[in-house]
Image (tube, rainbow, N blue to C red):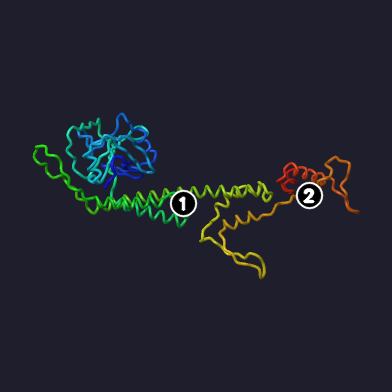
């Protein structure tokens, strides 16, 4: 049983799509949002059978459109009851859309229902279109849906292996994978149209509709297109994950370096370029190295990646104690009358004493500066 018109019905999907003229285009979320934005309740898109050009009846009208992830969903109003019944019974297994390009996006021209003969319903107004649509797309291909389901499952397994279930649930939720697999199975079950009958019109019986035979080359091309779309989506997800991971590591290590500076374990000069350096270090199983921790009989062998070792090294740095801190705090500055005490038989180099006092004063004004840096700054 198909969905009724009281539910949201998927009519189009983002990603790589091929229109009826064989042109391929990648539809972004922004493209789908433009279709939603250009929906005019006063001039809605009709629900039709097939892809009419003009003067075909409208069996209903699109009342609402919204985007849910990469899918475009629609609700319908004023649907002919007989047509709704056929849709609910699954007679129209596929849906298609025609899009009119506009500045900055697209407008939905109509939603076409494919797979069965149009019901003969009296009193329906004809649909008249001003010009040919530029793009027509058919949604629902069982082979493509099956391939995409497998690709999404492989992507989820990869994310779980590399980053854990939480990340996998964010980018490839299990319920989405299962929904796509179920949808593929449903499409396979409804590929053969169920015979329908139209009301007699008194005209001679129409000739059987033309059927198209798909060659192996057609099937191979469809499968390749689905694989290309899945590969493009996988590459996009990997790029996004890597960017997110690098941003997180940058933030974490920058916080660690800042904490080390605040604690007096690093100077700002020592920390320059440290974040970029640690991110450039390898952090995988292939580059792990073994080293001894401790000495003698207490030594243990450990294995770490270069990045993990360096992070542990920075975290274990002791607090730096500036030379002269505390013990020389009471020495007189340059020009003071009181001389520096010296052991018997030794003298004091007045020039170096002045430099020493200036360096101490510089450290008082710049608490994070070590003694040698202060000497260089005042020398």
Front of the two marks 1 and 2: 1
Q: Are marks 1 and 2 in contact (CB under 8 Å)?
A: no
Against 34, residue 267 (above or below) is below
The earlier-in-sequence mark between 1 and 2 is: 1
On the image, the x and y values in percent for residue 154 come to 39, 55
Q: Residues within 10 Å of mark 1 (few under 14, many from 20)?
A: some
Which numbered circle lies on residue 167?
A: 1
Decide which of 268, 210 is in the foreground and name it. 210
Q: Of helix, strand and loop, which one carries label 2?
A: loop
Alpha-carbon span between mark 1 and mark 2? 52 Å
Decide which of 150, 308 is in the foreground and name it. 150
The residue lying at 47 percent from left, 56 percent from top is 162
Quarter-of-image position of residue 103: top left
The residue lying at 84 percent from left, 43 percent from top is 332
On the image, the x and y values in percent for residue 156 come to 41, 54
Which numbered circle lies on residue 324?
A: 2
Which numbered circle lies on residue 46?
A: none
């Amino acid at each position: 049983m198909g969905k009724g018109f009281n539910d949201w019905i998927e009519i189009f999907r983002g990603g790589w799509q091929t229109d009826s003229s064989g042109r391929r285009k990648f539809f972004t979320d922004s493209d789908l949002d433009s279709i939603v934005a250009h929906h005019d309740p006063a001039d809605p898109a009709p629900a039709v059978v097939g892809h009419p050009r003009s003067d075909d009846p409208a069996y209903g009208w699109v009342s609402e459109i919204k985007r849910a992830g990469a899918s475009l969903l629609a609700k319908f109003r004023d649907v002919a009851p007989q047509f709704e019944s056929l849709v609910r019974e699954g007679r129209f297994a596929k849906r298609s859309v025609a899009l009119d390009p506009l500045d900055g996006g697209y407008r939905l021209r109509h939603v076409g229902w494919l797979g069965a003969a149009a019901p003969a319903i009296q009193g329906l107004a004809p649909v008249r279109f001003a010009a040919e649509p530029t793009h027509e797309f058919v949604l629902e291909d069982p082979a493509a849906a099956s391939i995409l389901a497998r690709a999404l499952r492989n992507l989820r397994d990869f994310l779980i292996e590399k980053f854990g279930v939480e990340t996998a649930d964010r980018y490839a939720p299990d319920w989405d994978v299962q929904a796509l697999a179920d949808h593929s199975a449903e499409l396979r079950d409804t590929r053969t149209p169920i015979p329908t009958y139209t009301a007699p019109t008194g005209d001679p019986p129409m000739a059987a509709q033309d059927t198209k035979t798909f060659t192996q080359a057609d099937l191979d091309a469809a499968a390749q297109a689905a694989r290309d779309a899945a590969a493009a989506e996988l590459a996009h997800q990997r790029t996004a994950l890597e960017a997110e991971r690098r941003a997180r590591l940058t933030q974490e290590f920058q916080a660690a370096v800042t904490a080390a500076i605040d604690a007096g374990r690093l100077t700002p000069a020592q920390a320059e370029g440290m974040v970029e350096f640690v991110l450039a270090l390898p952090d995988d199983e292939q580059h792990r190295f073994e080293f001894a921790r401790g000495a003698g009989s207490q030594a243990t062998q450990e294995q770490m990646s270069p990045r993990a070792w360096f992070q542990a090294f920075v975290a274990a740095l002791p607090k730096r104690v500036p030379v002269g801190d505390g013990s020389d705090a009471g020495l007189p500055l340059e020009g003071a009358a009181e001389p520096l005490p010296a052991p018997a038989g030794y003298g004091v180099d007045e020039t170096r004493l002045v430099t020493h006092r200036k360096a101490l004063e510089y450290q008082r004004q710049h608490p994070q500066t070590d003694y040698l840096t202060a000497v260089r700054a005042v020398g």
